[in-house]
Image (spheres, grey):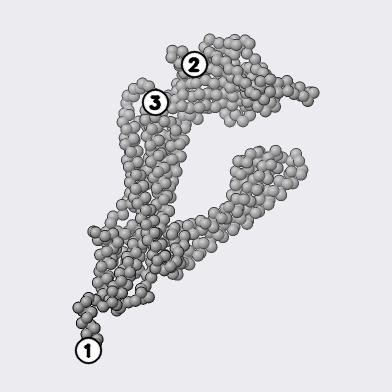
Amino acid sequence: MEESSDLYDVYEANGSPPWADDQHQCLEELDTVECLRRKIKYYFMNPCEKYHARGRKPWKLILQIIKIAIITIQLVSFGLSNQMVVTFKEENLMTFKHLFLKDYVDGGMDTYAVYRQADVYDHIDYIIEQYGHLHNITVGNHEYEKSGTFYTPLTVCQEFYRNGTIYPGNETFEIDAKVETECRKVYPMYHPSLQRAFPDFELHFKRMVSVKITFVLKAINLQTVRHRELPDCYDFTVIIIFNNQAHSGRIKVDLENDVDINECRDWKVTGASARNIYLTVLFDCLIIITCIISFTLCTRSVINGIQLQSEYTLYCKEHCGKEVPWSDKSEFVNGWYILIIVSDTLTIIGSILKIEIQTKVVTSYDVCSIFLGTGTMFVWIGVIRYMGYFRKYNILILTLRAAFPNVIRFICCAGIIYLSYCFCGWIVLGPYHEKFRTLNTVSECLFSLINGDDMFPTFKNMKQKSSLVWIFSRVYLYTFVSLFIYMILSLFITLITDTYDTIKQQQQSGTPTSELQKFLSVCKDLPNSGVYRLDKKNSCFLDCCITRSVNTHSHWPMLTHNSIPV
């Protein structure tokens, strides 16, 4: 007893005994692990739980709700404006076909063609005559293009092989494959026909590849005035093509127009105000600022997740001696945040293009539509993230995420079979069925068959010129329908169903399935317990760790390294 008393006096004089240092070290490691658990658990909380844990307002959630509303309003506004532009373009195209194509009937463009040499000259003269009398025949506000004080002429260009002698009766020919172009400029106001303007002009029908007639007309889209938008000035480059590339005796005629939208040079609008344009631009700037803030907040959250992933990986390597699986690492990278970041980027680019369109800097309606449409689609898909906080909705999201890798593998295997049928159908059935003429139409036809659409016409429209090919088509179509509808689609549905059942059983059992979930399940602290609140000087729950350390020194017995819970 005296020796032990003396030994106690020595330790009391020199400081704490050696086992007290070990105890203190163990408790520090325990507090570090508990702090890491709480940090990770806080990271995976939903906005309401984070509010109860630290009292912070769910700014990202509020910002996303506001962003969805204003982006949807922007998209609807742009869609209505774009709809007027598309309508004006389509109706002008239809107008030009009726004005410049002789005996044109709506819907007859696929069969509109000429078959005689005299008809070709007659149609060209008709176009020139109609162009010259445009002011007297059009009911629209169309006008000729001017170069200075003069009207720009109509251009007739003939493309033909440089040299060639063709004798089908003797089955002989000699051809120079180089294509030459001969162009003539016609002023219809002075010369109402091609022969009067150029008596020596001749079409080389044996060598002719095509004839292109080009001219420019101007118009103003006045319908936007009713929507308090300034009208745009349009330049329509009309191109009429006589296509003789097949040299089959049938020259197909087509009319196309390229549209250039410009700001009108001088304008005056009474009874309406143009300030709506500036308010729209200001609204677009507000959306850009909102998306930048959302982009910054989501990027910060992604970076925080990556940092937590590094801390957790380092802890597992140093204290547990094992590597973290990729499935657990991917939990720290929130795919919803990445989706929102992509959506914000697309919306920012689309909004900038929309501002430039409204100020007439650019006219890329299609490009702007792609960016705004895709960005809005991703924004609305991101709403599913917040639906996942409810237990009954979350099972759908978990099923989609769990089944996604298997679905991709399944689609890859099924896609190989699908492509094999596409190539086979194109090369064998293409000459006998219009739906198999190109690879694109073959793919569309087979995809329709998978969905049970247009099945009977596909069978019926097969030409019976070749009995062998007709029998092959039946075997081909029956095997494709049976394979994809009765087998592959059934397997696909089974794949999703099995994943759903697995996720449902896991939710009902409540047992953690991954190492990360097992690690977090040790922490039983509720969001409103107060242990998640941050100290002003430390971001690692220092306050709660110190409190827990004091309580441990007061009540816990001596611990060894082996007794620390992991």
Viewer-proximal residue among 199 and 82? 199
10 above or below 72? below
Q: Between tags 3 and 1, which lies in front?
A: 1
Residue at (50, 21) in percent of width and height: 216
Q: Secondary structure at mark 3?
A: strand
Q: Secondary structure at mark 2?
A: loop
Measured from the top left, where is residue 259 in percent x and y? 48, 27
Residue at (60, 29) in percent of width and height: 108
Rendering quarter of residue 277: top left
Farthest-out residue, right: 170
Indicate the quadrant containing the N terminus: top left, top right, bottom left or bottom right: bottom left
The residue type indicated by label 2 comes to Thr
Q: Which residue is mark 2?
A: 152
* Residues tagged 3 and 1 counted as in contact (Cβ below 8 A): no
Viewer-proximal residue among 200 and 505? 200
Q: Which residue is mark 1?
A: 2
Precedes in sequence: disc 3 or disc 1 = 1
- Label 2: few (<14), some or many (≥20) within 10 Å? some
Measured from the top left, where is residue 183 in percent x and y? 58, 17
- Label 1: few (<14), some or many (≥20) within 10 Å? few
Indicate the quadrant containing the C terminus: top left, top right, bottom left or bottom right: bottom left
Measured from the top left, where is residue 227 in percent x and y? 37, 32
Q: Secondary structure at mark 1?
A: helix
Q: Which residue is mark 3?
A: 263
Distance CA(mark 3)–CA(mark 1): 105 Å
**Horizontal placement of 382 versus 255: left or right?**
left
**Horizontal placement of 204 versus 193: left or right?**
right
Report whether residue 125 is seen: yes
The residue type indicated by label 3 comes to Glu
Q: Between tags 2 and 1, which lies in front?
A: 1
